[in-house]
Image (tube, coloured by chain):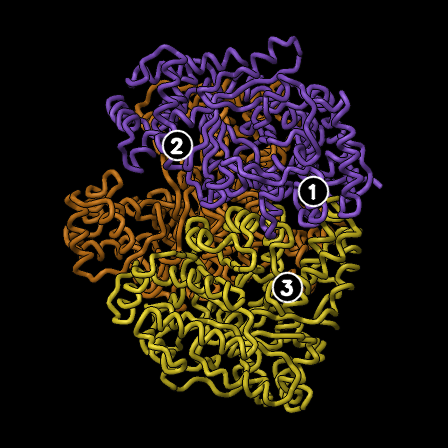
Chain colours: A orange, B purple, C yellow
Amino acid sequence: MALLDEDRLFPLEGRARDLARALYNEVRDLPILSPHGHTDPRWFAEDQPFPDPAQLFVTPDHYVFRMLCSQGIALADLGVPRVDGGPVEADGRKIWRLFAENYHLLRGTPSRLWLDHGFQHVFGIDRRLTAETADWYYDHIADCLARPEFRPRALFDRFGIEAIATTEPATDDLRWHRMIRESGWQGRVLTAYRPDGVIDPEMAGFAENVALMGEQTGFDTTTWAGYLDAHRARRAFFIEHGATSSDHGHASARTEDLPQEDAAALFEKALRGQFTTDEADAFRGHMLTEMARMSLEDGLVMQIHPGSRRNHSDQVLATFGRDKGFDIPGRTDYVAALRPLLNAVGMDPRLTVILFTLDETAYARELAPLAGVWPCLRLGPAWWFHDSAEGMRRFREMTTETAGFYNTVGFNDDTRAFCSIPARHDVARRVDCSYLATLVATGRLAEDEAPEVARDLTYGLAKRAYKL
Amino acid sequence: MALLDEDRLFPLEGRARDLARALYNEVRDLPILSPHGHTDPRWFAEDQPFPDPAQLFVTPDHYVFRMLCSQGIALADLGVPRVDGGPVEADGRKIWRLFAENYHLLRGTPSRLWLDHGFQHVFGIDRRLTAETADWYYDHIADCLARPEFRPRALFDRFGIEAIATTEPATDDLRWHRMIRESGWQGRVLTAYRPDGVIDPEMAGFAENVALMGEQTGFDTTTWAGYLDAHRARRAFFIEHGATSSDHGHASARTEDLPQEDAAALFEKALRGQFTTDEADAFRGHMLTEMARMSLEDGLVMQIHPGSRRNHSDQVLATFGRDKGFDIPGRTDYVAALRPLLNAVGMDPRLTVILFTLDETAYARELAPLAGVWPCLRLGPAWWFHDSAEGMRRFREMTTETAGFYNTVGFNDDTRAFCSIPARHDVARRVDCSYLATLVATGRLAEDEAPEVARDLTYGLAKRAYKL
Amino acid sequence: MALLDEDRLFPLEGRARDLARALYNEVRDLPILSPHGHTDPRWFAEDQPFPDPAQLFVTPDHYVFRMLCSQGIALADLGVPRVDGGPVEADGRKIWRLFAENYHLLRGTPSRLWLDHGFQHVFGIDRRLTAETADWYYDHIADCLARPEFRPRALFDRFGIEAIATTEPATDDLRWHRMIRESGWQGRVLTAYRPDGVIDPEMAGFAENVALMGEQTGFDTTTWAGYLDAHRARRAFFIEHGATSSDHGHASARTEDLPQEDAAALFEKALRGQFTTDEADAFRGHMLTEMARMSLEDGLVMQIHPGSRRNHSDQVLATFGRDKGFDIPGRTDYVAALRPLLNAVGMDPRLTVILFTLDETAYARELAPLAGVWPCLRLGPAWWFHDSAEGMRRFREMTTETAGFYNTVGFNDDTRAFCSIPARHDVARRVDCSYLATLVATGRLAEDEAPEVARDLTYGLAKRAYKL
């Protein structure tokens, strides 16, 4: 029995199904470009085996453990580490059994599709994960992981990854990227410049991070001018390590273009830790415009990922820390928020700003109209909770008519779960081909134009937008 | 001629249609669980015949009379009673004719489907309602209503209702529920605890209601502690009369978890009628958290139904009172609003809080991400204006991928129109089976897993979530 | 090769496709009613040839030039005129080549469908527009334009237009409409009363416009009473020139029903140019209620088009002026906003207020519930960025179940691009017929009722709602 349907996610009606399958056959084997994600560069630097099946599939995957948590299973019982180092379940087999017993909770979710894809394609499994097959699964996967062809670099090659970007804080020493480069291995692993920790005055450690950035660059980051120069230097350092993009994860999409003296005054307050909530927000907003200006100088593509309300549970944050499934999307406005940045630099076609959203109501109302006219803007793919068959379909249906295809940038997997990378790209390719097939079958796209669009959505647009 | 298509609401493509029909055949005859609604318990207590066709189908159904009103037909001409007892149309046949002449206005609406279902399945009618057939219809239905097999209890049994919940204010004497129990009839009619009238300081009669609750329970409801004890006592009284849930219909989803002395101070202001709009709102929000704490003690499942902007027309409110079709949904935020309650008690898996919405933009953005991680949260079904084929489809498409099936609670009919109960459950079963069939046909759900999910969506989830 | 698929936009499944085609065949040749749009009445008054292909298809069409702009093509290179009269590209052939080279950018957009429709049906073209065919296209269209059968009046007749409304400011002299009438030509070209320039204190020239209205009418528009009388007189003047509707394009849907003395005080501030942002907004809101009262007197149908955030780029506004593709939709609330107007006059069925939105989240949540109960309200069709196959489908799916068909008003093309009129109406007819066919195929609409609904959506509803 195959875990996966060969024709999954294709349209049901015969002609559209045939068209989708034909388009998919054109793109299924194209290389994977993964220009935005959160895999660990250390995997590729050290190339050590993944520790055990639970550590590979359950413990690091917030999509999986949040669903189990929602039905009353404790995070500690899934091996999620405590910030105080206190005891959590360490027996991979026990974690795996708990996961298997509750695998039905994932019915109908993209995680189920990604997991089954990994089981079938990476580990050659042909039976369903259940309480009964849990131990067989565990043993089989553990056996595989001990073999050289399941080490990170081998999987990287097997997955057909042409380039993958990780994301590091502005003050990261990028040691793993250096180690990868010095190792002589040919896999292309890029970093991306994520300066939230030195831009957001409300983030713990802001002043220390800014001071560290001063040490790293030799600029006096107690001054506004020195702080900006330090950014320039760190961006250059990241570019040396392959970066082609920066990434910004603010709570809102607010931008500002303040007079330099006002920005300098806010920076001083930020360093002293004496600011109002609105001042912190204004500072973050202004820094997006500064980052855009630097992008015009150094060519980094700018990604804006706004709208997550982080750490909704105080108890989970205190016990397990950040990124534990308790980040919830909120409404996000783009029109007024982006106006200062756009009016400052947005007509310059040398700049690329890629917008993401967790608020699908913005697709047709704000994001497609914005990207459909401002030369610098492009739309990132359906993100996070919307990175699913229905989410991707809604993205195309609500953005294409106003923004077209060429103001989008292909797919991002954005994942921490390594085995989900080919699975996620496969879903995106199937959904995009199905969308194109439906357009052709309903007379909205010429049949001879569709294959080029399919290849652009799969490969060309990401390559060009992210300068890969 | 049948009024209804046997295969209505199923997918169009052949294989998906066959799968949907097969799933539907598994669940079509399962008993009806109706855990939330507004039928009148007096019907089942007294078991008197329904008065006439207009009183059964038109006058009490705000879905129907609001549509007629929208095209300029006066509510008084439809027999909707005036609050001052002034004259309105009393001739059932005249009302029925007016309804029949305008039946085309309901084309494409769920009301049309519910009405035709009642006509065909309850009254065995096989011709369409039009101006020409109006009198025939009236006579036929009136004849039926005079017969014993069309009395409320007989219909209850014929509809296959296993349990139905009504909704009563906290100060209700539950006489009809007592009468039902004492009658020896085996039909299971539960109440639900709806304390809005003793929680919302802005509702007319708040102080009197609180005083009455004191008399009913023997607690001193002029004090905060006594007021809380009175709630506990009334909840216990409702539980004695079958209640398994409470229900809360605030304008927003705001919750608060105030220090007890602050809550007590707000309560005192509320009793004196001296409070700001925000203080009233904060008090309502705090009381949701108190209700959640009591649920941990007594086991009542908590339902939150926010987001209706009530009584949009001053004139209709003054003339005809509340619940006359002029309640309009508004935007509703859940993420910040629910945080205080959730941080107080939300990680406790013994608690169940069922969230509803009139703002579909919250499904994928807020509600599914919340229910997909917080152990206490479940999603109620598509509600009110969204309780329709398209609305239910959107609910599944926008919640399943993040919340799965097992953080939802099956169907609620939420109706005042008795004959619409089997019709509404039938629509829900068809739409859910169609959704599942589409998942199977597109490789997103295994064919052998679908029947279990179909039975859970129809019966199992409601039974477990509402503790029926 | 045909540019267009004969069965475009129909459902894919066989039976639904057949039903859609049959319904479409019933309505495809019905006359075009275009009750709201922005064609230039001078075309029909003077009946001069359109100057060249670029002036017909590119330069005036903000859908087209905004997409080219979004990929870095300068508006000046597309011949968009500068406000200072400075040099822009004047060579139609060069503009056309640039357009043709970038025609792939429009793949998947409604503009592509409208353009191909115009090329095929108006100009008899059977080959695709590409860089290679650009010159052939240019020559062919230019040749046509020189012929009498391609003049505006000939095309008007050929398009089957029964009536078309243009939109003029309140102070317009309507000279072209007078010229049309006096010419003896039988084409029915109406105006519509657009008083934004004399209602919005924040619009440039407000006081001058109000003064001009005084001169035009003989009323003293320095007083509140005279200002209202001047409106009445201008409305009468517009009615003499065929107007059956007024049109209001405010940033929000806010209405107010202020005491007359407060309104008079705001008017005085507005005239003096001394007002806060909120006072300007309140004045606009109050004037909508005054306009509704005048509609009760003179019968003009009122259209409200809120929610556009105009002129997002300062640079484009300064260089090229308004309406240059940089108008971006924003969130729009209707429930609280419309309450004052509705409570003032909304229960009167003689009044018709047609609501539009750029915020699709309001369809199911606010607009359908409002139009489904208030006698005066009707829903305008999917508008602007949503005037597309997917947008129209979403409109029907999200409004029909609550508002039905008879609270909608048929299609508006709302265009400045003359050749797109038959194309847009054809898209609307196909999408509506496909929606109806899907309802029939899924048992939600009786097959014998569908043709009447199709004709109403195409013709009858517009005729009645707009009193044409």
Q: Which residue is mark 2?
A: B203
Residue B462: image quadrant is top right
Q: Is residue C250 above or below residue A253?
A: below
Is disc 2 in contact with disc 3, using a CB cutoff of under 8 Å? no
Disc 2 versus disc 1: nearer the observer: 1
The residue pinned by badge 3 equals: C464
Disc 2 to disc 1, C-alpha distance: 36 Å
Q: Which amino acid type is marked by label 2?
A: Met
Residue B96: image x %, image y %? 70, 41
Mark 1 to mark 3 CA distance (whole Å):
27 Å
Q: Which residue is at 68% across, 44% downward?
A: B99
Q: Quadrant of the N terminus of chain C?
A: bottom right
Residue sitting at the far front: B87
Amino acid type at mark 3: Arg
- Residue beneath the point at 36% across and 23% down: B208
Q: Which of these two is toward me, C386 or C169? A: C169
- State the count of labels: 3
Instruction: Confirm whether circles 1 and 3 share one chain.
Output: no
**Mark 1 or 3, which is nearer the eye?**
1
Kindly identify which chain the residue marked by label 1 belongs to. Answer: B
At 38% across and 65% down in the image, what residue appears?
A: C312
- Helix, strand or loop at label 3? It is helix
Residue on which disc 1 sits? B94
Q: Where is B358 relative to C415, above or below?
A: above
Mark 2 falls on what kind of element?
A: loop
| Residue B463 picture quarter | top right
Q: Are marks 2 and 3 on the same chain?
A: no
